Structures are given as structure tokens and as C-alpha cells.
Amino acid sequence: MKFVKWSAVFGMAFLLSSCLFGGPYTVGGTVTGLQGSGLVLQNSSGKYLSVLASGNFTFPSGLNEGQTYSVTVRTQPSNPTQTCTVANGTGTIDKADVTNVLVTCSSAGSLAFVANQTANTISAFIIDTSTGFLTPVTGSPFTSTGLAPIAVTVDPNGTYLYVADNGSNEVSVYSINTTTGVLTSNGLIATGSGPIAIAIDPTDTFMYVANVNDDTVSAYTLSNGTATQISGSPFGGVGHEPSSLKVDPSGSYLYVTNFTDGTVSALAIDSTTGVLTSVIGTYTAGVGAQSIAIDPTGQFVYAANETAASISGYTIASTTGQLAAVPGSPLATGSSPEALVADPSGKYVYAANVTSDNTIATYGITPSTGALTLLSTASAGTLPVSVAVDPSGSFVYAANNTSGTVSVYSVDAATGALTQVSGSPFAAGSGARSIAIE
């Protein structure tokens, strides 16, 4: 009898201890790109959370250790209408608050920016969201604050434009007037030698720059358009002549193409500090690995191998960041793919083919394997070296280097086929090298 009473008391004490020390733990993360009103998130407990602006969020009710969580969008924003998607939205509570849920909001692209390397300018355009037609922004093209602008990237909140200046070893920062598209200089950031590509993580917290001349990646924390170099930067762990880089949708990994080696490097991102560490394994791509794209689900990585005239495809192991070749990889293209981009629906990859081909090719993604199938091609200008797709997936844009123009295409949602819009191609500047859509 005494044993039974002791057991009951012990059990009650254990239960009380579990309640006191096993939780509750909160679930939260970051919202980026929010412009509209009315965004409501929902968790698996049926609790709702209204989000008024980009930034951090936390559901007020907690969960205990071992409970599962799931964050979804209950109501999409309006005025303007936007589509918000969730990454890192499901999991199990493991003795800590969850802080890495990512909610990314986007609307139809309203602005386009082009780096004109030879002209040393940045062209800016207002996009007609119904037709894709480009109208130059007042004052465009803008004189670059650095030398030989080679790559442009808009931050996830659509507030700043970052430009890699290959000739002066800097990144130029411009604030964007989201109504008029006018650019205002916001300073310069020192990089390694030969900055050639920029990637920003989905939380708008970290920026990474590929330095083609010294085989490194520079890393920075971002805050209101200012950048602070991360301890240990620039980082090695990449191959010879890193040519492009992308962060996966979860913000966990950075993937880098290495032009001379014909490889892809994988680096893990510390979510607190932004520090990079190499993921085990070196991944063969093809000669002249020049561009990289990641599908919006974060399952597949694709590398354009310009010299080898092929596209390499990989699946991503979500827990390690390691890559494995998809069936049929590398896929022979019969042309020289210089640039790649995946559309927001995850159905298509678009490739800019340079040399005598001068086309934009549409490839279908097999959802179960990531394998690519060529579906169609469309003519571009001379030497298309950069390709972008607007956030709605309605239009595709190509910067034509030799022509100094931008080709704009409407997308057939059912087939991915591209048709040039009225007025295309549009004049940009000499040596148009990179294009980004906001």
C-alpha cells in the first residue's frame, strides 16, 4: 500500500515537473516582402496570427516538447494582392523555441533593373503588370557608383538594389523608390577580388558575394541597406573561379558553381551568425559551370554548364545539404546555357543559350525526380547572358549582352512556352549583363 501511494505521488511529481520544464515553446520566424494588408497565419493548434508588416513574428500560444507544429497561410494579403508561401513550416518541438519559419510574400513584378557592364550604368524600368511592357524610369539609366556593374539583386523586401561592381571590387547599394523606381545611392561595400554574383538569404539577414578572382565568398549581415562583414569572411570552401551562387528556400544552404573546375560547392549557413561551413562532398557539374538555380520547393538544384553545353541537376538532402544527381544528368542541351532560373510554380526552368543559338529554352521539371525535359525555345537578342522570371510567373526577361537590350516574354502557364510581348526587345545599355525583377 505504501508502495502504491509513493508511486502515485512520484507520478504526480513527474507530471508536474514535465509541465513546468517541458514547455511551452513558441513557434515563429520571419516574414519578408509584405506590402499588402490582411495577412493571417495559422498554426496546427488552430490559432491565428495577423501580420501587419515584414519582420519577425511569434505565435503567442506555446507547445510542449515532442508536439508537432505546422504553420500555413490562412488569408493572403490584399491591396495590393500578394501571394505568401511558407518554408520550414512543419516540424516537432525539440526543447527549444522554433524561430526559423520563413514566410515570403510576392506580387506581380513592378520594376526591372539591368546592370550595363560596358556603359557603367544601371537601367531601371517600370513593368506593366498586365502586358509585361517596360517603360524607363525617370532618370534611367543611372550612373553606377562602382566600376563595371556585372550583377544585380533585389533584397527580399524589395527595398534595396545590390550591384556587384567587378571592376572596383565593391557592391554598390541603392535604395529603391518602390513607387517611381528611382534609385538613390546608399553606399559601397568592399568585397574580395572580382565580385561576380550576389545572393541574399530569404530572411533578408545575410548577403553572400562570389569573388571570381580569389576563389572566395564574402559574407555580410544586412540591416536597413547597410552591410557588416561576418567574422571569418571571406570564406573559402569553393572551387576555382566561383561564378554564381544561390541560397536554398529554407535559408540553410548556399550553393556555388565553379567555372574552371566544373563543379558545385555546397556550404551550410549558420542561421544565427551567417558563417559558412563546407558540406561534405564535391559535386561534379560540367565544364564552364556558369549559373545555378534552385526550384521554389527547395528539392532540386540545377547548374548551367556553358562550355559543356549541358545542364546538371541534383536533389537536395534537406537534413545535410548534400546533392545527388537526378536521372539523366547532365542533360545535353545542344547549345551553351549561360544562365538559369526556376519559375515560382516549380514547373519550369528557363535557360539563356548564348553563342550562335541566342534563345531562351523552357524545360519541364519532373516533380518526382527533378529530371528536365526540353519543351520549347524562343528567340532572344544577341548573347543572352541573364534570365529572370517575375514573382507571378507571368513574364520572363532576358538581358542580351551584345544587343544591349532586354527581351520580354509572356508565359503560357500550361506549357511554359514563351511569346515575346509587344515592343520587345527594349533598349537597356551597352553590355547588358544581369537583370533582376522587383
Image: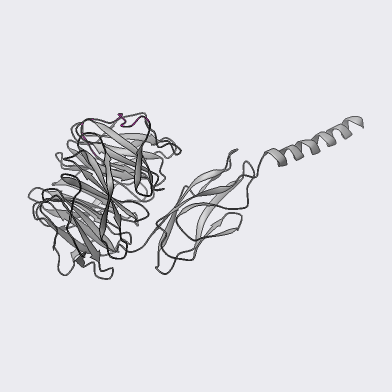
Whether residue 287 is situated above or below residue 389 in the rendered picture = above
Tell me the residue at 19%/45% (across/down). Answer: 146
In this rendering, position of residue 234 left or right of residue 352: right
On whether residue 68 falls in the magenta region, the answer is no
Tell me the residue at 35%/45% (across/down). Answer: 226
Start-end of magenta stretch: 231-243
Whether residue 286 is situated above or below residue 388 in the rendered picture = above
Place of residue 12 in the rendered image (x, y in percent of width and height, measured from the top left): 80, 39
Closer to us: 149 or 299: 149
In this rendering, position of residue 354 left or right of residue 231: left
Asked whether the viewer can see residue 221, the reply is: yes
Quadrant where the image shows the C terminus: bottom left
On whether residue 242 falls in the magenta region, the answer is yes
Place of residue 299 in the rendered image (x, y in percent of width and height, measured from the top left): 37, 45
Closer to us: 28 or 419: 28
Place of residue 2 in the rendered image (x, y in percent of width and height, measured from the top left): 91, 30
Q: Where is residue 221, by image quadrant? A: top left
Tell me the residue at 60%/38% (across/down). Answer: 95
Closer to us: 111 or 411: 111
